[in-house]
Image: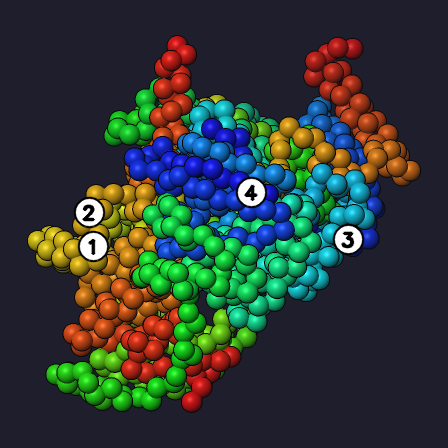
Amino acid sequence: MNRNLKILIIVVGIGINIIGGTLNSALKLPLFLDTIGTILAAVLLGPWLGALTGILSNVFSGIFTNPILIPFALVNGVIGLIVGFIALKRGYEDYVTPIIIGLVLAIAAPLVGSPIAVYVFGGLTGGGVDIIYGLLLGTSERIFTSAFLARIPTNLVDKLISAYLVFFIYRALPPQWKMLSSARREKKAEAS
Amino acid sequence: MKSLYIAEKGGYWYKLPLKAKFFSLALLLLGILFSAHQTVLLFNLLVILLLVAPGSGGMVLLSRLKAFFFFGLFIIIFHSILNPANTIKVYFFGLEGALYGSVVAMRLIAVVAIAQSALITTPPKKIFLLFSSWNKDLGLIMFLLVGFIPVLEQELVNTSQAQQTRGLTWNNIIEKLIAYLAMIIPVIIKALYRAQGMAALLFLRGYDSQDRIMAKRSLKPLWVKGSRILIVFSLLFFLINLSLFAGLRLKVW
Amino acid sequence: MIRLENLTVSYPLKQEPVLHGIDLVLPVGHIGLVVGGNDCGKTTLLNTVSGISATMYNAVLQGECRVEGKIGAVLQDSDLFLMPTVLEELEFPLYHYWQNRKMVEERVAWLGDKLNLNYLMKRSIHTLSGGERQRVALAAALAADAEVLILDEPLAQLDSLSAKRTAAFIRELADSGKTILLASTNTQFFHCITDSYFWLDHGKILWSGSPGSFLTQCPSARLKGVDIYEYEPVKPKAEGKDSSRSDDYDKGDEVLHYSDVSYAYDSIFALNMINLKIERGTTTAIVGENGSGKTTFLKLAAAILKPDSGKIAVLGKDISKLDIAEATADSGFLFQNPDHQIFQSQVDKELAWGLKKRGFSDTEVRVRVNSWLQKLGLEKYALDHPYALSKTFRQWIALAGVLVREPSLLLLDEPTFGMDTVSTARFAALVKEAAGQGKSIVMITHNDAIANICADRVIKMEKGRVLP
């Protein structure tokens, strides 16, 4: 694929992350939906550029709105990486792939995110998750484990729904765009 | 787009050359992260606030930190009650938890103060040029985004209006998710076609990733009188913290 | 110079080549104009010459395509831009010279003078009007001092005064030694500046020669969508004069009633105390300059915007307390850009979606979708992805999406924007047919011909007011 187009798809991915989050709050959905663009970019561009999309997304929002988002770029990057590899292996056209992606991300995102959150915020979010966190702290006696477990339910719902939304978005794309990711899969199949 | 940058207030952080500013702030940040003990961290936080606040518009910085002061307080209270390490208790406030919470809170405030002072005194454009000097495509992505986001926002408004005139409503969560798709899909498809057009435009305007010229623009030399003092100070700050860390935590001494 | 010999261009997902056996020679200092209707291959031809067909769209080229000199181009979609502000946009192509600050500043100042952009330099491009953006696009194409200029519809969004000025400037550029290739459906402003015409139809050059002899030698060009003549200026028409149509609906019954309506964006009045009644069963055209409040006027009628003061009744119902979906229960709104609403992956699903949202039964949906696809000649494309078709087709699809509900009031914002004469005529026929069935139509248009042919009444707006 053309290098300029890759650059621009990364730009679109970051833009969709931001707009997706805006739309989520405009519709008053009880989710985040701010990694749609990372997932889509990872499907179209593969794992490494997908990870770059995720990382730059947080860096850009960090510079413009709140610098504390920057350490969490790692989470967004890992999301791009994981989705990219799974999409490379399975494509993104069957109903099962989004479940796999949603489940893997529901574990992976908090696995990367909670150590950062524990270090930066003492594991707190300033939201409803803190109640679960507090309850878990009372029983499990481990800060990291509690912060990690507390984040799984919200992530599970958010990432599963995100993965399915991207699935429907991907299906609605014109054929030329789907060719981008299928061409990459064929290349990979030839190489191996 | 609205950013965290605030036009010049006359503080000395504004006057420093970009690379010197970011270099010394990075050293200060590392110093904070390597703070070895809570009293050292408290001292470090005071040093940072005294160094950073007057140079970057003072009150502006403090007002941006206000939310983090409250959040820091919340962290301390939360951990003093619920931290599993609590053994010594005053009523139901545990000392170990309070200590843990206050370390996190002080570190958070110091880190945010450093980052905010950089962003208050530097327009995003200059930060992106710094990215360009490192990797040209990276800087370009940031510049393109600044122009792209308002277009996407406008497209989202238009699409939402158009879909509503066709009867789109949302009252429960399933309808909301469908509405989300009905609005985001046209925006994404248009964005991808726009991306294609912009990629063509990049080609036509002679953009070449391999060409390294763009980077050299307007980045002033690193060593400028005045910035040297700051860099030496930051370096000392970092080294003292590092050696304290090595001594107290890693027991090197 | 530009030399194309027996050039054939095809795209990977399409079986038919888009261009067949093109021969075209344009010497240095000449202006060539490619004329033709929508989807005749103009844009592909220009993109091939500028090199982006092959590099960006993976087109396969056969034959010879030689261009001597550096290329600058304005793409068909002039809303595209790269950088946040005008100044950065103009500096961007000059980044090779950034070490030479003075040279860059001089170049930008020259462009600013020539295209009247100096007062816009600090503005964000997304806040500019269409015409201003068009001028920025042209300036950016010129910035790097290219020898060959490829300009696709460079005057599309300009008003007639700046179109004339820009056309004269393009001639000046050619006289200073640039080779310029233009494309347009409309020859109006290019007639006196162009050296040669290339009439393109279905991917073939049917005729080439000097502008003067085009009219006499190719009278059939107009039937293929090329707009050669200037239209008569629009005549304001009085209310309800048209008595030729059947009278089986209630006249005097109002479809739109605005009383003392005002609307302001950021405390600047877009509409100022509008009082207006539009009768049921009439076709009304709203004309006026950009920024005169036309679109605001129309959006108020669909409750997309809420008036700051005053009352609006649509089809006898006060819409001030209704949301958009309720207010448009029996009216249809067509946005200027068809792409705002298209989101299904098939044309037929796209038409069905709006009906389902309005609670039509499945069989009713099927019947209506099929009949309207047939009526608009889209049945061949029912299963295609809307974006696999051209923009003109998507305009028809968006229009079909509105008509398929058969609402009694149609609100159309620039429905023929970018259409050639053939499509415009087809659109006019559709409007007349709908009006014949007793539907009320309110449309914004820049196309005087449409206003003349279809409308019973023409409302002229200026600075947020309705002119008497």
Q: CA distance from mark 3 to mark 4?
A: 29 Å
Q: Which residue is mark 4?
A: C2
Q: The residue under label 3 is which amino acid type?
A: Glu
x, y percent for residue B241: 77, 24
| Secondary structure of the residue carrying numbered label 1 | loop
Give the mark count. 4
Is there CB contact under 8 Å for labels 3 and 1?
A: no
Residue B85, quarter of the rendered image? top right
Q: The residue under label 2 is which amino acid type?
A: Lys
- In the rendered image, which quarter contains the N terminus of chain C? top right
Q: Is residue C366 left or right of residue C275?
A: left
Label 3 in the same subunit as label 1 = yes
Q: Earlier in the sequence, mark 3 or mark 2?
A: 3
Label 3 in the same subunit as label 4 = yes
Q: CA distance from mark 2 to mark 1?
A: 7 Å
x, y percent for residue B24: 78, 33
**Which chain contains the residue that carries disc 2?**
C
Q: Which residue is mark 2?
A: C380
Give the crowd class for mark 4: few <14, some 14-19, many >=20 residues within 10 Å: some
Q: Which residue is mark 1?
A: C377
Q: Earlier in the sequence, mark 2 or mark 4?
A: 4
x, y percent for residue C341: 33, 54
Q: CA distance from mark 1 to mark 4?
A: 38 Å
Q: Which residue is mark 3?
A: C106
| Secondary structure of the residue carrying numbered label 2 | helix
Q: Earlier in the sequence, mark 1 or mark 4?
A: 4
